[in-house]
Amino acid sequence: MKTIALSETHIALGAKMVPFAGYNMPVSYEGVNIEHETVRNAVGVFDVSHMGEFLIEGPKALDLIQKVTSNDASKLTIGKAQYSCFPNETGGIVDDLIVYRLKEETYLLVVNASNIEKDWNHISKYNESIGAAMRDISEDYSLLAIQGPKAVEAMQSLSSVNLSEIKFYNFVVGDFAGIEHVIISATGYTGSGGFEIYCKNSEVQQVWDRVLEAGADFGIKPIGLAARDTLRLEMGYCLYGNDIDDTTSPFEAGLGWVTKFTKDFVNSEALAKQKEEGPKRKLIAFQLEERGIPRQGYSILDENGNEIGVVTSGTMSPSLSKGIGLGYVAIENSKREGTIHIQIRKGQVPATIVKLPFYKV
């Protein structure tokens, strides 16, 4: 079991620690509902230092990224980030990721913790014929996500950078919490705004302490991975291993918007054909019309009780006080006017297919 740099700090704060993606991680502090509402209404800070970071550098860097990712990284200018995915050779997804353009020939790829080794091997395989410089810096860097509507106001005293001017999916390399040259990125996984801060492991304790100090008057609290999951699900953001994996295509998962055929990339020919013909199944969003909590693996039924799909993510939404979820169904069962049921133990709970996000500001 790997530990993150602030592991002892979280334990001292009373965090419940659990194994996650090979790391000992804080899943909750005060409880998921309290932490969820803190992020929706004020500001919270997550330690997500388990995430993986790869540097791709040199004159061949863009060539490699264009080959292995589905989005068009040639559109990135310095200071911009892009959501993307790694398609595999059989129509599925190796991982989803964020690509940052740090310098003219330097890119940062941020990948999921559970896929660090898999992603590295996948990229390396294609790099054999391209020859970009690759560095895995995952073990050297920490990542804090400061999320919520009060994030800008609460954190402005920690930086000479005008935080309110950093647009969504843009970033600045600047000073923060007394540390020079950290990445301040207007990205996140909650839908409530805020920043992600990348710094070295040796610097993260200072950053964490200063963030909590600066945010005290704004009601800041440390937030665990359980609330991160309920927050992302209310926005309909995919979670790798649940909603997307090696068997789900970008078009099935609603990620056609990050799949650009302006270039040749891994399995692009087959994916272009799927786009033209249309996928045979689709990831839908649904909310329960009666009490119940949908969970991953539960069956999705049609109005006659026939199984038509499976739940990939589900929870009781703290913001809506309703059971919500995502799941794959055959394309003919994906229309929003359709009535479905979720098999919860022995009961069949009626649900409505809805448009994302579940939570609207």
Image (cartoon, helix red, strand yellow):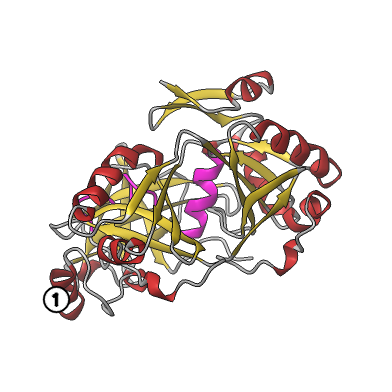
Mark 1 closeness class: few <14, some 14–19, many ≥20 residues within 10 Å:
few
Report the side of 335 relative to 113 (left or right): left
* x 59%, y 38%: residue: 200
Given the image, on which type of amino acid does mark 1 rest? Answer: Lys
- The span picked out in magenta is 226-248
Foreground of the two, 5 or 150: 5
For label 1, the residue is: 273
For the residue pair 190 and 21, the one nearer the viewer reads as: 21
Q: Secondary structure at mark 1?
A: helix
Task: State left or right for residue 47 relative to residue 303.
Answer: right
Q: Is residue 116 left or right of residue 53?
A: left
What x and y, as percent, mark residue 151? 73, 54
The residue under the point 19% across, 52% down is 128
In reply to whether residue 283 is colored magenta, the answer given is no
Q: Is residue 100 above or below residue 22?
A: below
Q: Position of residue 252 (x, y in %)?
A: 25, 64
Residue lying farthest to the front in this orientation: 59
Toward which corner of the image does residue 222 lie, by quadrant? top right
Q: Is residue 8 visible?
A: yes
Front residue of 352/117: it is: 117
Q: Which image quarter holds the N terminus?
A: top left
Locate the C terminus and report the quarter of the image it occupies. bottom right
Q: How far across and down, in percent of the image, does residue 294 sit?
A: 39, 45
Residue 56 against residue 17 in the figure, above or below: below
